[in-house]
């Protein structure tokens, strides 16, 4: 079981909600590894991209689909694509050693751009 804060963080991902996202990010990082949070954020962004493109993600309950659909409406396809690209670039730079920042710090930077 994941702490409720993680799901609140994932649901808070939306433009103009930076303060709340950062508050939840700080709380979630106290109990969960940044890598796990990064993975869950990536998964959420992929789900939002799929829904925005008219594809229903697998293994999503009807109530989750409704929630994800509403969340996807808050983004443009270009914005979701840019977030996904930034997350991927962060992963590559951290794993290749070209980033002086951790994956957690990189995700925090991405949150600031939403």
Image (spheres, rainbow, N blue to C red):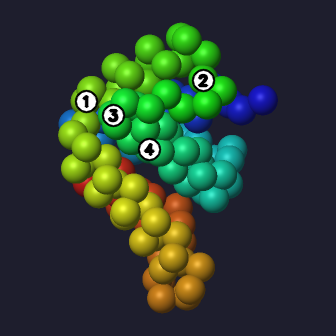
In contact (CB < 8 Å): disc 1 and disc 2 = no
Q: Circle 3 is placed at which residue position?
A: 52
The kind of secondary structure element at disc 4 is helix
In this rendering, does residue 41 appear at all?
Answer: no
The kind of secondary structure element at disc 2 is loop
Say which mark, if any, is on residue 45. 4
Query: Where does residue 65 sit, x and y in percent of width and height?
Result: 49, 19
Measured in 3D between alpha carbons, the distance from the residue under mark 2 to the one under mark 3, in whole angstroms, is 15 Å
Q: Circle 2 is placed at which residue position?
A: 60
Measured in 3D between alpha carbons, the distance from the residue under mark 4 to the one under mark 3, in whole angstroms, is 10 Å
If you read the primary sequence from the N terminus, does the residue marked by circle 4 or circle 2 appear first?
4
Q: Report crowding for label 2: few under 14, some 14 to 19, many 20 or more residues within 10 A (C-alpha).
A: few
In the visual, does 15 lie left or right of 4?
Answer: left
Query: Where does residue 45 sit, x and y in percent of width and height?
Result: 44, 44
In contact (CB < 8 Å): disc 1 and disc 3 = no
Q: Circle 1 is placed at which residue position?
A: 74
Up-down: is 86 above or below 114?
below
Measured in 3D between alpha carbons, the distance from the residue under mark 1 to the one under mark 4, in whole angstroms, is 12 Å
């Amino acid at each position: 079981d994941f702490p409720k804060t993680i799901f609140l963080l994932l649901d808070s991902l939306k433009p103009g909600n930076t303060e709340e996202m950062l508050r939840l990010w700080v709380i979630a990082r106290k109990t969960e590894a940044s890598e796990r949070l990064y993975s869950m954020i990536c998964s959420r962004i992929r789900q939002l991209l799929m829904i925005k493109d008219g594809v229903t993600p697998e293994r999503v309950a009807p109530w989750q689909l409704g929630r994800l659909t509403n969340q996807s409406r808050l983004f443009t396809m270009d914005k979701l694509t840019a977030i996904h690209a930034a997350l991927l670039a962060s992963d590559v730079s951290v794993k290749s050693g070209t980033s002086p920042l951790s994956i957690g710090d990189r995700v925090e930077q991405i949150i600031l751009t939403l």
